[in-house]
Image (cartoon, helix red, strand yellow):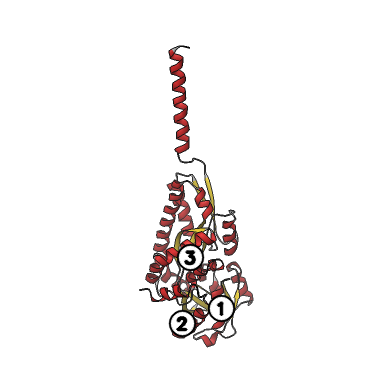
């Protein structure tokens, strides 16, 4: 065989090795499709923020990562979504205190009269306490937060004014399927009825339940002003929710794609915060324009009773953490 033949064969193998190495080290060009389901409707800030996340994931990945967003519980109710994510059927959802069905620390996301204001909330979630909750979520539930949303204060809506805990007695109140919420409202004298959010409007309309509690954003986007007259300004919860992704799915992605997801999550959170701060006063005015009446309540009386109920119902394992959040400055 001639020297030229050996040269050609050697060159061929060099080119083949380079191609193989390139294939091994280059980012995957395969399209990734991820499903993001949540309970807000298309007008809700959660949906707009989820769409912002999808747009950022698309642009940062040059179209390789497609996040398909399904609002209004199209992929299932909140707890169903968590189970679907754990099973690898769905990829993202928005959730908060419902996670206490798996870890008790998640109850802080929606605990009555625990968080004082948005500054206090930020110190909790972005600090060591929040980092510990995230670790628990990853290890014990198998979901990873990619961002979080502060929530507007939750208020009680009804068809009669309620100014004191005594006036709650016997009222049938829809609550989320969260133990601390059920226990607190029961202790305050109501008859709490756990129910999926998608069923609340019809239940109020038909009189199956008489009242419900949510932030202005969900009161407005769900149209509860059509079936409720009063917003009783209990302000009983200032909480937060996480946008979570299945940990197994996250770890299955290339490092570059993981970074894209986390960056898109950070940009989504920044977008949400801007819009959220602008809309709280707007939503309050909108509800008034729709005919709802705002009732000032004896908040100190509600808080005093709620504090005792909450402390009495907490597992001893997280009581010190509860106290640490209470005194955090």
Secondary element under disc 3, as helix, strand or loop, is strand
Please say if the residues under marks 3 and 1 sit with CB atoms less than 8 Å apart: no
- The spot of residue 53 in percent (x, y) is 46, 54
- Along the viewing direction, whichever of 145 and 203 lies nearer the viewer: 145
* Residue at horizontal 39 percent and vertical 70 percent from the top: 118
Q: CA distance from mark 3 to mark 2?
A: 22 Å
Q: Earlier in the sequence, mark 3 or mark 2?
A: 3
Counting residues from the start of the chain, the first of labels 3 and 1 encountered is: 1
Residue situated furthest top in the rendering = 2
Above or below — where is 149 with respect to 36? below
Are the residues flagged by discs 2 and 1 in contact, CB closer than 8 Å? no
Q: Residue at x 45, y 11 (%)?
A: 2
Residue holding disc 3: 241
Residue 25's image quarter?
A: top left
Q: Position of residue 288 (x, y in %)?
A: 47, 75
Q: Nearer the viewer, mark 3 or mark 1?
A: 1
Which quadrant, please, contains the C terminus? bottom left
Q: Residue 175: where, in percent of width, then height?
A: 57, 74
Number of numbered tags placed on the structure image: 3
Which residue is at the far left? 329
**What x and y, as percent, mark residue 90?**
57, 55
Above/below status of 157 relative to 261:
below
Give me the residue at 41% from left, 53% from top. Answer: 263
Crowd tier of the residue under label 2, counting other residues whose Cα lies within 10 Å: few below 14, some 14–19, many 20 or above: some
Q: Please state if 153 lies on the left or on the right of 180 as rendered.
A: left
Q: Which residue is mark 2?
A: 303
- Label 1 sits on residue: 183
Residue 277 is labelled as: none
Of residue 111 and residue 217, the one placed in the foreground of this image is: 111
Disc 2 to disc 1, C-alpha distance: 14 Å
Would you say residue 120 is visible in this rendering? Answer: yes
Q: Considering only order in the chain, which callout, 1 or 2, is on the residue closer to the N terminus?
A: 1
């Amino acid at each position: 065989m001639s020297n030229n033949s050996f040269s050609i064969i050697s060159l061929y193998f060099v080119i083949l090795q380079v191609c193989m190495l390139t294939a091994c080290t280059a980012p995957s060009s395969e399209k990734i499709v991820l499903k993001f389901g949540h309970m807000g409707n298309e007008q809700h800030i959660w949906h707009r923020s989820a769409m912002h996340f999808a747009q950022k994931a698309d642009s940062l990945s040059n179209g390789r990562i497609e996040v398909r967003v399904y609002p209004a519980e199209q992929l299932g109710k909140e707890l169903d979504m968590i189970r679907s994510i754990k099973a690898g059927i769905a990829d993202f959802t928005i959730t908060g205190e419902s996670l206490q069905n798996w870890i008790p620390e998640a109850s802080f996301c929606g605990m009555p009269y625990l968080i004082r204001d948005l500054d206090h909330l930020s110190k909790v979630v972005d600090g060591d306490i929040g980092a510990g909750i995230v670790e628990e979520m990853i290890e014990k539930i198998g979901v990873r937060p990619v961002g979080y949303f502060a929530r507007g204060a939750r208020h009680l809506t009804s068809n009669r004014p309620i100014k004191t805990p005594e006036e709650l007695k016997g009222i049938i109140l829809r609550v989320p399927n969260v133990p601390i919420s059920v226990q607190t409202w029961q202790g305050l004298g109501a008859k709490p009825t756990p129910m999926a959010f998608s069923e609340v409007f019809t239940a109020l309309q038909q009189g199956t339940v008489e009242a419900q509690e949510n932030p202005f954003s969900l009161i407005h986007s769900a149209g509860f002003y059509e079936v409720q007259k009063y917003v009783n300004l209990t302000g009983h919860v200032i909480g937060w929710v996480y946008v979570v992704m299945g940990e197994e799915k996250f770890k299955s992605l290339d490092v570059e794609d993981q970074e894209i997801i986390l960056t898109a999550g950070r940009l989504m959170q920044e977008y949400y915060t801007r819009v959220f701060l602008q809309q709280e006063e707007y939503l309050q005015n909108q509800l008034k324009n729709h005919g709802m009446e705002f009732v000032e309540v004896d908040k100190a009386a509600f808080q005093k009773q709620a504090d005792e109920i909450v402390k009495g119902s907490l597992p001893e394992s997280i009581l010190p953490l509860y106290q640490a959040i209470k005194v955090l400055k």
